[in-house]
Image (cartoon, rainbow, N blue to C red):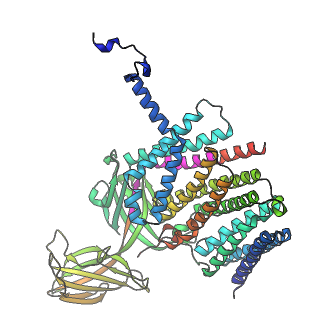
Amino acid sequence: MKTEHLLFWVAVGLYGLSACSYIFGLISKQDKLFSLGLYSALAGFIPHVLVIALRWMATGISPFITISESITFGMFSAVLIFLVFEFTNKKVRPLGVLVMPVAFVLMGWAGTLMKDAATQLAPALQSAWIWVHIIGAATGFGAVLTAAGIGLMYLLKEKNSGGIYGKLPDTQTLDNLAYRFVAGGFILYGLMIVSGAFWSNQVKGSYWAWDPVEVWSLISWLTYGIYLHLRITFGWRGKKLAWYSLIAMIAMIISYWGIPFTMETFHQGFRIEH
Amino acid sequence: MTEFSKIPRNSGNKSGGYPVFSSGNFIINTLRMIYNFLSSVKLALGLLIVILVCCIAGVTIYRDKRAWELIFSTFWFNGILVLLVVNVAFCFFGRIWGRKVTLISFGMILFHLSFVAMLGGIIYNSLFYFHGLIRLTEGETLPNEHPQSYDVLNRGRLFDQSRLKGETTLIRMHTKYKVDGEDKMVAYEIAVGEGRARKQGIVYITQHLDYRGFRYYADREGYSLLITLHDRHRRELYGAHIPLQSFKQKDDKYLYATGTKDGPAPLAFPQDPQKPLFDLLVTYLPTPLKERAGDAVFQVWQHTMVPEEGTGPFAEGKAEIGGMVKAGNYHLSAKEVRYWVAMSVRYDPGQPIVLASLWVGLGGMIITFIGRMKRGSA
């Protein structure tokens, strides 16, 4: 087994341990299990970073192109945002109960799809816009995944009191936190769409062509645009938006990795037919 | 004086229980109704949801071409998009007008203004644009102003035809083209324009050539064979460059042959305006050992206007590039291999407005976000 594969599965294993710790911590209301979950997520993040670095160094090509690489990088951003948030704001300790199982499942799926690193980058992908586009997409996903996790915390806090729930911030704070992450994600999705439009314009001379992936990115953006509209204009707060962010999260996973990479689109790279 | 003049003015609905028709009020009320409709936040939300549902349908129930035909290219869907922008303008600017400008409201103004500017750019572009697909074989020159020079041609109602000046030449197609060590696979060396203003340059997938606002983009390419016709004494009678189609096979390899995008097919040879002698299907088998070399396979049928099923070719044969194959009283040769390329030619005067609006919109989002964070922490 290659070092790269070994490290990848170590990261998946540690994320699995983290996910289980968070879930059992929530069921048994054991605070210590959240600490185990957090530190195993941190431990898993190290081989996760190393896998990306090793693939990158092996060929010199940014490893964000295939579906497996795309998920790996998306989860890198999500876990990074989660860890930074957890170590800077220690009040939402059970947050990993949503973030880490998602990271574990998606990373496991990415592992089954993993191929050797590409030896050359398709000509259409040789553009500086790809960097802005990928970073916007991955960090946007990380932000809305965290928002969905906070939404879940809101719903749990609202139904339960005392114990681990007593240590969570009040519902209004959770609601505001989720809103901030959604607003951040909305901007990052905006960055993803704008850079994608410029990239498409560089290659095809048109910034928008209703390509399935373009439409999916618009769906992501509109989904959170509607969230912000409901909150700012219609005064929605709390429970309804917490549910909205959780349901939107499922749509985001399908939007990112469920459909675009299974269809013949611009994102599979240009084929020169001669 | 009629009975009407006895009715007191400005009586409203109190004149004997019956509403009084006033043309002035009617116009004002209608305008107010239209304004209220267009500036409704509920309409904005409703439109956002409708667009979201259409988008989901356009990538799940219907896909690709079907989605384009049924949703994204339709008048009603584009009407919804326009209505959303008009609604955004009414809804937002009607509320913000006259209020104190804060960091948040400034960001919101930029964000919503970008939508309006984007629509303006799209409308302007739709009137003046030019999109063409030009196909050239190496060495070929086509006049830019002739519609026949383009395989596909679309233009705005107000596009000025005199903007299309000069001609376009494909000098050569380069394979394995590299820029700073990066493999661009193919690049087209082209010349565009007229006289001294003629511009020469290289086009590849991430690099276009701009000539007076007309941008040339790489689209696709293929092989083109120079097929020559010879008499029984092998004297050359006729020749034509015949572009071949690329057909992807089940094993992911490509077959290069005459035909249409739907599959290999024979074509009349010699070509129009010459009188055809027979129908010819040519397949090219390139060799990986040498560029522009390999074999050509000829299949020759009696020339018929409507091809008959089950009729086999009366002559067939294989020869190296430059070699000859006998076809009845004649000989055929694939004398030379060249490349053909198709380039997308675009003139979009409204595009800079749209692209700039995207950044303005993003800037607006960021400013609003910063404003809200500041207010939150305060």
- Residue B125 drawn at (x, y percent): 41, 47
Viewer-nearest residue: A164 or B251? A164
Residue at 48 percent of width and 39 percent of height: B38
- Residue B39 drawn at (x, y percent): 51, 38
Residue B67 is inside the magenta segment:
no
In the displayed image of the protein, which residue is found farthest to the right? A32
Left or right: A178, with B144 as reference point: right
Residue at 46 percent of width and 43 percent of height: B120
> Does residue A61 appear in this view?
no
Quarter holding the C terminus of chain A is bottom left
Residue at 66 percent of width and 69 percent of height: A73
- Residue B97 drawn at (x, y percent): 58, 32
> Does residue A254 appear in this view?
yes
- Residue A86 drawn at (x, y percent): 79, 62
In the displayed image of the protein, which residue is found farthest to the front? B17
Quarter holding the N terminus of chain A is bottom right
Q: Does B68 appear above or below B256?
A: above
In the displayed image of the protein, which residue is found farthest to the top? B1
Quadrant of the image occupied by residue B7: top left
Left or right: B365, with A271 as reference point: right
Question: What span is in magenta?
Answer: B343-365
Q: Does B343 appear above or below A59?
A: above
